[in-house]
């Protein structure tokens, strides 16, 4: 009886609880739309104004590069050209566009002054340029520069970086190996730091027999092949990004290394070690070999043939410190460059003279010969302004501003291509 009463009470409580449960709401047949992001129209890029040059569209330089036409801007090529030639910027006049084709069959446009000098160049990109390297790239010639240690400053460095592809590393044993027990790389490192990612590295000489540039302990030691190979290897390993190496500079049969290791044995040894340590082109470097048929030329040519027979050499380095009173002719240079049978590198070009017109003509002839010969891969200018072996021998004056020699070189490039593809 008690159990029956308990069950009845429990049942009543359950009914009461169920009565309080509310039915679940039913879903609407039409789903509610989710809010959408409001479309924000993208800004329309302003088209670059173009000019037509013989059917080719290139950017309007006065719109894309107005600073280059600002006659109060000291960096304007118009102003620099006027200063070099001793005229007022207003006298340069209008620049005329000219369509040309590079040796790689790529079209480009130059803006030329009324006197025939190209001042700006573009390859249909959004900006015009005026650097030396932008002109020489059209003829597949790389331009490098050497800056005399301790003589360069910020402006000189910037001019070098703007105009040249490569910087020459100063590799001097008396500096690097001054201490027998460790190497001091600070001098070449300073040039690597300057170059950063903007310039390539052109290797200096791995062996130079000039005793003024050898450390005292080394000159007084018993020089061995193993020792020299080790020093060469250490330099190459330190600078793996170097694009070209000069294993030997200015060798001759009775020099310091020849008297200890034999000639041409030491030259062959140096090239052999360098070939093992790098894939960069290897170049024999010397002076007074730009004139064909001389005793110095014949001696060097024989050495080149010896190295070629062992597949140890890729190019000849002709220093080209030119005597302005007795310069080689353009025709003689073309003959000389072709005579080597390998690639040619003009490694230390300078023309020391205060006669600006003469210097400009010689520089122009050298570049013209290089283009005509078709075998010159690189031309290194031996300094910028004061940062040079001889301050009056390069393309820039003491204030690191362009001289007429620079503009004559650029004109030589345009004249060469114009002759190949007359409009």
Image: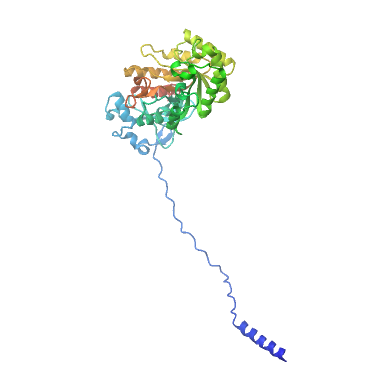
Depth order, front residue of 251/359: 251
Q: Quadrant of the N terminus?
A: bottom right
Color theme of the render: rainbow
Pinpoint residue 220: horizontal percent, then vertical percent.
49, 16
Residue at image coords 36%, 19%: 390
Residue 373 vs residue 130: left or right? right
Q: Is residue 335 above or below residue 174?
A: above
Pinpoint residue 27: horizontal percent, then vertical percent.
58, 72
Depth order, front residue of 386/125: 386
Q: Residue furthest bottom?
A: 1
Depth order, front residue of 363/368: 363
Q: Is residue 266 visible?
A: yes
Depth order, front residue of 72/144: 144
Q: Residue furthest right?
A: 1
Pinpoint residue 259: horizontal percent, then vertical percent.
52, 11
Residue at image coords 54%, 14%: 261
Pinpoint residue 224: horizontal percent, then vertical percent.
55, 17
């Amino acid at each position: 009886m008690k159990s029956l009463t308990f069950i009845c009470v429990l049942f009543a409580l359950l009914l009461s609880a169920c009565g309080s449960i509310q039915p679940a709401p039913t879903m609407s047949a039409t789903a509610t739309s989710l809010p959408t992001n409001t479309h924000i129209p993208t800004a329309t890029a302003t088209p670059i104004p173009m000019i037509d040059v013989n059917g080719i569209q290139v950017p309007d330089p006065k719109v894309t590069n107005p600073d280059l036409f600002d006659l109060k801007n000291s960096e304007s090529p118009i102003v620099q050209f006027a200063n070099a030639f001793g005229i007022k910027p207003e006298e340069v006049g209008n620049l005329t566009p000219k369509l040309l084709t590079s040796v790689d069959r790529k079209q480009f446009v130059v803006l030329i002054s009324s006197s025939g000098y190209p001042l700006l160049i573009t390859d249909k990109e959004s900006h015009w340029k005026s650097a030396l390297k932008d002109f020489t790239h059209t003829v597949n010639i790389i331009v490098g520069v050497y800056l005399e240690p301790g003589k360069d400053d910020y402006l000189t460095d910037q001019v070098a970086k703007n105009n040249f592809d490569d910087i020459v590393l100063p590799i001097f044993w008396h500096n690097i190996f001054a201490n027998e027990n460790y190497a001091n790389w600070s001098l070449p490192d300073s040039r690597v730091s300057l170059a950063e990612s903007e310039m390539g590295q052109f290797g200096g000489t791995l062996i130079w027999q000039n005793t003024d540039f050898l450390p005292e302990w080394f000159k007084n030691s018993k020089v061995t092949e193993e020792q020299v190979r080790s020093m060469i290897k250490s330099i190459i390993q330190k600078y793996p990004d170097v694009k070209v190496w000069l294993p030997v500079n200015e060798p001759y049969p009775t020099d310091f290394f020849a008297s200890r290791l034999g000639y041409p044995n030491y030259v062959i040894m140096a090239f052999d070690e360098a070939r093992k340590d790098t894939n960069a082109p290897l170049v024999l470097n010397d002076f007074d070999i730009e004139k064909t048929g001389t005793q110095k030329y014949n001696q060097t040519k024989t050495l080149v043939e010896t190295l070629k027979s062992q597949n140890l050499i890729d190019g000849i380095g002709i220093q080209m410190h030119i005597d302005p009173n007795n310069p080689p002719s353009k025709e003689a240079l073309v003959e000389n460059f072709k005579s080597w049978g390998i690639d040619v590198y003009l490694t230390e070009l300078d023309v020391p003279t205060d006669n600006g017109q003469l210097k400009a003509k010689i520089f122009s002839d050298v570049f013209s010969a290089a283009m005509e010969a078709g075998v010159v891969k690189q031309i290194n200018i031996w300094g910028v302004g004061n940062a040079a072996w001889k301050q009056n021998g390069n393309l820039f004056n003491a204030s690191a501003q362009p001289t007429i020699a620079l503009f004559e070189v650029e004109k030589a490039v345009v004249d060469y291509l114009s002759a190949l593809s007359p409009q």
